[in-house]
Amino acid sequence: EVQLVESGGGLVKPGGSLRLSCAASGFTFSSYSMNWVRQAPGKGLEWVSSISSSSSYIYYADSVKGRFTISRDNAKNSLYLQMNSLRAEDTAVYYCARGQSLVVVAATDYWGQGTLVTVSS
Amino acid sequence: SYVLTQPPSVSVAPGQTARITCGGNNIGSKSVHWYQQKPGQAPVLVVYDDSDRPSGIPERFSGSNSGNTATLTISRVEAGDEADYYCQVWDSSSDHYWVFGGGTKLTVL
């Protein structure tokens, strides 16, 4: 059974940093692209970042470019999102989601339950 | 940047057919994916690559894509289909990124 479990969310002050993690199990992690998608309270889905299976291709939304860094450790079956210079508008539930294949253009077929990040003073 | 436009809400009676549209410039040239999200839950992929269904998704869910509009069709709507639905495409016209539509709230009357 495919499982994605996010962790690392919490309350942080504006300008602060957080590192989100996503532990994957039930599939060959190194064969799939991975994504972070967020959802602000009461709002729609917003794509944040994607990484190909071998980390060769990495993409970011303009809203987080230069502040967030996506990475993965295929040996540990884990996906990460380092978030720096956080702003109030980054407040959201952050979902880890698996791509259907090793390339980032594939749809996301499994999602974690999300971790809440709150940016507030 | 590429924009996907969805109606904020669609209402349908049980047993009827719901159609949720997703508009975008020449969207017919892109692969469209659709997600269902119920309150307090993570999204679920219901249609990918315009019209394919993941395993476990009922045949009642279907998709089409042509011109400037993609459509998610839900036949024989059930109360359990009430949810938010989002369309998604990968846009590489100016930069490389995923785009989501604003979402459509499906209400089963």
Image: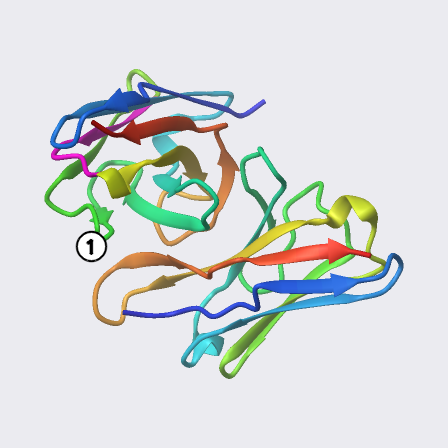
Q: Is residue A85 magenta?
A: yes
Magenta stretch: dominant secondary structure:
strand
**What crowding class fits label 1: few (fewer than 14 Cα within 10 Å), some (14-19), or many (20 or more)?**
few
Which residue does the numbered mark 1 point to in the structure image? A62
Asked where in the image residue A116 lies, by quadrant, the reply is top left
Q: Residue at x 19, y 31 (%)?
A: A83
Please say whether residue A30 is one of the residues in the magenta stretch.
no
Task: Report the residue that reaches farthest toward the right.
Answer: B15
Say which amino acid is labelled 1.
Answer: Asp
Residue at the spot 18% in from the left edge and 26% down from the top edge: A13
Residue numbers of the magenta segment: A78-87
Q: Is residue A110 visible?
A: yes
Q: Is residue A28 above or below residue B47?
A: above
The picture places residue B73, in percent across and down from the top left corner, at 71, 65
Q: Residue at x 27, y 69 (%)?
A: B1
The residue nearer to you, when weighing A31 against B97, is: B97
Q: Quadrant of residue A118?
A: top left
The quarter of the picture where the N terminus of chain A appears is top right
Which sits in the foreground, B93 or B11? Answer: B11
The image position of residue A32, as x and y in percent, is 39, 37
Can residue B47 be seen from the camera position used here?
A: no
Residue B40, position as x, y percentages in the image: 58, 33
Q: Is residue B33 left or right of residue A115?
A: right
x, y percent for residue A54: 25, 36
User: Residue, x 37% and y 70% (percent of image)?
Assistant: B3
Above or below, comparing residue A65 to residue A120 in the picture: below
Is residue A2 toward the left or the right of residue A16 in the image? Answer: right
